[in-house]
Image (cartoon, rainbow, N blue to C red):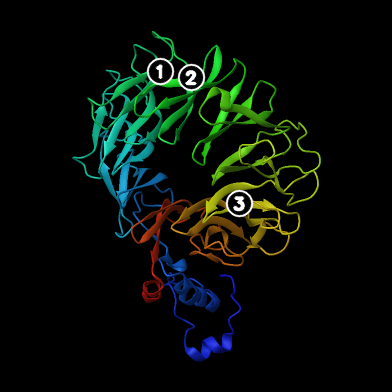
Amino acid sequence: MAAWRGVPVVVLLLSGVLGVGCGAAEGEDVSAMGEVSAALEPAAYGGPQPCGPSARLVGDVRRGEEGSAPETLVEVAGQVFYAANDGVSGRELWVTDGSATEARRVKDVRPGAYGSTPRFLTRMGGRLFFVADDGAHGPELWLSDGTEKGTVLVADIRRGAQGSAPDALTVVGSRLYFTADDGVRGRELWSTDGTAKGTQLTQEFAPGQASLYLDDLTEWNGKLALVAYGDAVTLWVVEGRTGTSRALFRGPEQSVVFSLTPAGKDRLFFLVDVGFGEADLWVTRGQPFLTFPLRHFAGDYPSELTPLGSAVYFMAGAEGFFGEPGDLFHGGELWKSDGTLLGTRLVKDVRPGPEGSLPSGLTVLDGRLYFAADDGVHGRELWSSNGTAQGTVLVQDVEPGPASSTPTAFAVLDGWLFFSATTAGRGREGWYSNGDPGRVDPMRDIAPAGMDANPHGFVRAGGSVLFIATDPAQGEEPWALPFLPAARCARLEP
């Protein structure tokens, strides 16, 4: 049920507002309070808003309870692309704009039941890039503008059916970087502008047929940062314009460098495990002499590094995977770092004691951090923080009492936070919030009788928010929630 705003029911009854709201599916029980919330509240916010109970199935690609198992919704120029299996053509690329009642297959890249298995869907400009295997060229890089004619192979980097198997697609400016193996020089760093002529080897880190393992490709203020594993582990930065590279950090062969996270104008945070199963937080400002460690964290690795302004937020201090002790005083809690030793600190001990609140799902909305945490009283619920202990607060106890709603699948779209959460009466369903304390509302209950629809992958296209969810009768398919000005929400047919 939608959160109550404290508006007197008598006044609403007299004014005739009750019963006006976003349309509900036939047979769905939507409370009067939910309709009041949908009809009244968002008007004060001016722009588009979620029309809560109005989500509908879009593109039942594979009829029946199995569903098409869509993967990775990606919005490009008002269209949403995804890979799905219709049970006939295998896994291929599909597209919808959310306004139609059906999705359409973009192109049968590999005719027959096997499918081309599109993966690593990545937007660059107004086109979608992805890796697919057409059965003749092996896994190679493709692009699509949403039409069959405009869905083409970018370049056949490795001739023959084995393919170059592009990986780690990362956009930097107007070029797409990735790793690929051309069969001659091993797996190296490549880039493309979307044409065969403009697809080229960017840097050969290991001469000849040898290869280094290239990982964690990350866009950083118009540059590409990545980690190369060989006799040593090296953090590299590649200039986007010139293609020149320089090493910022080197560690011994047994070390691991990961979680590259840009923040602010010039800071790149990352984690280093030198081989002992615990990690140090590091920062660089683009030069080796400005690359240094900030703090060692015992126990589990710091996780979910999330930039907000010029700082990075993360969870740290939890017990290790094999029971290694973490922070014995605070447990796993929310930390932040501004790139200085003194500015790397605990934000708030949400759950005092060594167990910790274990923040997860860190997401930024309008200059605040939102996340799930368990304070030991309300269960795992939605919290927010402005970076101070006083400003770290519970947003709403979605499942009241000590039970947990366990929010997950956070996505921020045009000033609204979307996520899935579990309640006793509804199971795991979709929710949304504008971030204000107490302002958390439910989406349609897609899976009946307390079953789990497990909505995730929220993206916006035009007047809809699309996501993946499971209806027991139709399986896992894309759904669309109207995202419209309040007046248009209220006019939707129930």
In the picture provided, is 196 more to the left or to the right than 468? left
Residue 379 makes an appearance in the image: yes
Residue at figure coordinates x 48%, y 71% from the top left:
28
Please identify the residue farthest to the top as the structure is shown.
208
Q: Amino acid at mark 2?
A: Tyr
Q: Residues within 10 Å of mark 3 (few under 14, many from 20)?
A: many
Residue 484: quadrant of the picture: bottom left
- Residue type, numbered disc 1: Arg
- Would you name the residue on which mark 2 appears? 213
Q: Nearer the viewer, residue 438 or 291?
A: 291
Helix or strand or loop: what does disc 2 sit on?
strand
Mark 3 or mark 1: name the one nearer the start of the chain: 1
Q: Dot 3: what SS?
A: strand
The image shows residue 209, relative to residue 465, as above or below, that is above
Q: Is residue 214 above or below residue 492?
A: above
**Which residue extends farthest front?**
289
* Alpha-carbon span between mark 2 and mark 1: 8 Å
- Residue 214 drawn at (x, y percent): 47, 22
Q: Residue at x 78, y 33 (%)?
A: 325
The circle on residue 84 is none
Dot 1 falls on a residue whose secondary structure is strand
Q: Earlier in the sequence, mark 2 or mark 1?
A: 1
Q: Which residue is mark 3?
A: 371
User: Horizontal placement of 455 versus 481: left or right?
Assistant: right
The residue beneath circle 1 is: 187
- Residue located at (40% from left, 63% from top): 483
Q: CA distance from mark 2 to mark 3?
A: 33 Å
Please provide percent x and percent y for residue 223.
42, 31
